[in-house]
Image: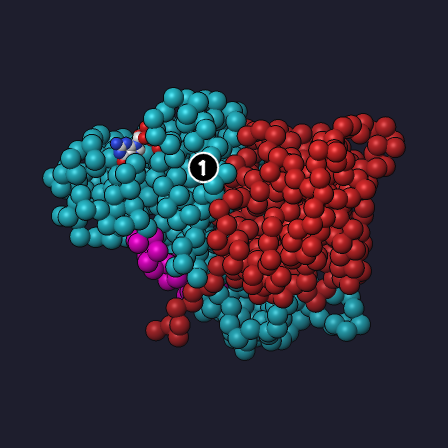
Chain colours: A red, B cyan
Amino acid sequence: MLQHDYTTSQLDVLEAEAIHIMREVAAEFERPCLLFSGGKDSIVMLRIAEKAFWPAPIPFPLMHVDTGHNFPEVIDYRDRRAAELGARLVVASVQDSIDAGRVVEETGRRASRNRLQTTTLLDGIEENEFDAVFGGARRDEEKARAKERVFSFRDDFGQWDPKNQRPELWNLYNAKIRKGEHIRVFPLSNWTELDVWDYIRREGIEIPSIYFAHTRRVFERDGMLLPEGDVVQRGDDEPLFEATVRYRTVGDMTCTGAVTSTAATVDEIIAEIAATRITERGATRADDRASEAAMEDRKKEGYF
Amino acid sequence: MDILRFATAGSVDDGKSTLIGRLLFDSKAIFEDQLEAVERTSRDRGTEYTDLSLLTDGLRAEREQGITIDVAYRYFATPKRKFIIADTPGHIQYTRNMVTGASTADLAIILIDARKGVLEQSRRHAFLTTLLRVPHLVVAINKMDLVDYAEERFEEIREEFTQFASKLNASDLSFIPISALHGDNVVSRSENMPWYQGPSLLHHLEHVHIASDRNLVDVRFPVQYVIRPHKTEFHDYRGYAGQVAGGVLKPGDEVMHLPSGLTTKIASIDTFDGPVTEAFAPMSVTLRLEDHLDISRGDMICRPNNQPKVAQEIDAMVCWMADATKLTPRTKLTIKHTTRTARALVKDLHYRLDVNTLHRDEAATSLSLNEIGRVSLRITQPLFVDDYARNRLTGGFILIDEATNGTVGAGMIV
Ligand SMILES: Nc1nc2c(ncn2[C@@H]2O[C@H](COP(=O)(O)OP(=O)(O)O)[C@@H](O)[C@H]2O)c(=O)[nH]1
């Protein structure tokens, strides 16, 4: 007779799986890195990396693709957390890519650096010779992600070919690549938005302040609340007003919408998400609204 | 709350997408913006009702062809459980996807169109499910609304399937009559089928007992990564990190290291959150041992009186997954088994199995894409293996093409 029934809770199963994935990568690749944006998914990923190698330090650097349009609160958090862990932080800057003539800044009211990030990211991977790149993407986020592998193979142009992905069986991941190719690794593939929040609550992890309700001057565009800010271009027909809001995702200030909310604690956020009827991307990301196939197209080019 | 992973299989148009769409919709895993997009597309295509199957159509190429061609993963939760669906398409050519989806599944749902009954493809799905040792099998007999919710039809199909399944020694087998389109017996019991006394599909998924499906008997700990902090605080720390593949480990237990055959005791089982008093699958932990042994990735920790086979010659059922190449005797491949990677040579192909009739073709000289056969392999290094039937984690392996690096085969040790 067994003493108990050895049931494992969903967060423990997801955590154990993610730790396993991280250790596989550390064992099989020479130069992994972890994409750390200061967003909630990458925060969870970083905590898992901390757990996977404890008591040793995380055996790879962090990389952030800095668009220059990020929320300052998030950049502060990023730097603080990296310092706390004693991790090396590589910042790949979209501004540098623009200055070097690698990409051309979009113009107009809806200009965004979202698409430009792909070039900066791929350049950063190439310059640092990273062969495995951890990303915080989840399969529940978006249709095109539902078929994404945990180890997602990228050719030497950094491109993703949905028709040429390796089957993944059991907990066995194929880490073989040639020079110049790399693998994007998604340890949180099987997590949902709610799992991420439940985990943040359980672990008591600090998160950037913009995730909690705060008063902010915003304006409305396409049914989204965009923030006032130096980098955000606002028309005269888009009046500013003050609102109590929070963010469900953190992206660029130019294209990340806030939701009206009074949730001031992680518990309140969880209660709100459990009741919400709109996906996080649908609610808050202008970049995904462009078309039904928007994410798929960006992924093929090498986006996160 | 725990997690149930299940795979769905059905022939084209049996209603798989509709069923998944309904499970997601009724469990509120579908959000308004997703539903709006689907309503819009349904309207554009001139469909009268909202086509829930659109919710699960993934990539654009597939949308354009109107078929699902790769394993897609979906998520929903009820207050009882979190569910991960491996949505595997049922086309004849996609055995590969079904095998992939089933490899991690606790349960498989096979859909059958009540009008058509048990087809050749239903047999194939049942066979693959048992080959991959999915512990629980549910046969969902769909479109009951189109056969007047008739008990006789349900019984007919149940009988035919049961007869066939007895040849497969399928484990836990259940039958549920449903209408995915109208929702009968999907979330709640149907009033249209008072003759059916069993649970609704969702109720079954919420309550099926899975904790004891894991191997809790044979201690198997494949060493994944050696942790050596090189910090003053943990100067002499040496931990062996890995995910438990079988059995229950406790501090103080006598253990054996393979390949050396040396024994020692577990000094402690460490995690970031502190030491634990026991570890079992699927926990990821770090073991410290009382004696200093030379241990590296790919080694195995087990119990002295319960060891895996140490084998350089293995026999396995192999599913071939490559478009461009075939498996033939003399083929050289890379094999990945637990945390050990080695080279393998195909010594013999004993037979190719017809997945529809279970006929063994002993004259076969190769395996092509989506074909399954019994193969002998010689490995350059010993592997620490169990029969797949005893432990899916120490009995399964993948084969990698040394030229393209693609994953070209999946094997189950027999
Ligand atoms: N009458 C009826 N039609 C159904 C049922 N389930 C699915 N269908 C229809 O059968 C067709 C194929 O369903 P779909 O879910 O796309 O099948 P798939 O190819 O297995 O994913 C669609 O027109 C569905 O509306 C059912 O329970 N009753």
Residue B369 is situated, as x and y percent measured from the top left of the image, at 45, 29
Q: Nearer the viewer, residue B340 or A55?
A: A55
Whether the magenta-drawn stretch holds residue B105 is answered as no
Residue B33 shown left or right of residue A91 in the figure? left
Which chain does the residue under circle 1 lie in?
B
Q: Nearer the viewer, residue B141 or B104?
A: B141
Q: Residue at x 31, y 49 (%)?
A: B187
Location of the N terminus of chain B by quadrant is bottom left
Q: Quick check: which quadrant has ligand 1? A: top left
Residue A128 is situated, as x and y percent measured from the top left of the image, at 80, 42
Residue A10 is situated, as x and y percent measured from the top left of the image, at 48, 59
Is A158 above or below relative to A90? above
Residue A155 shown left or right of residue B249 in the figure? right
List the single residue furthest toward the bottom. B252
Q: Secondary structure at mark 1?
A: helix
**Mark 1 surroundings: few (<14), some (14-19) or many (≥20) residues within 10 A:** some
List the single residue furthest toward the right. A99
Q: Residue at x 40, y 55 (%)?
A: B78
Residue identifier under label 1: B35
The magenta stretch is B203-221
Whether the magenta-drawn stretch holds residue B209 is answered as yes
One can see residue A177 in this view: no
Asked which quadrant contains residue B273, the reply is bottom right
Q: Residue at x 25, y 46 (%)?
A: B185
- Please state which amino acid type lies under the numbered disc 1: Leu
Residue B217 is situated, as x and y percent measured from the top left of the image, at 41, 66
One can see residue A207 in this view: yes
Q: Nearer the viewer, residue A167 or A245?
A: A245
Q: Residue at x 62, y 61 (%)?
A: A264
List the single residue furthest toward the left. B152
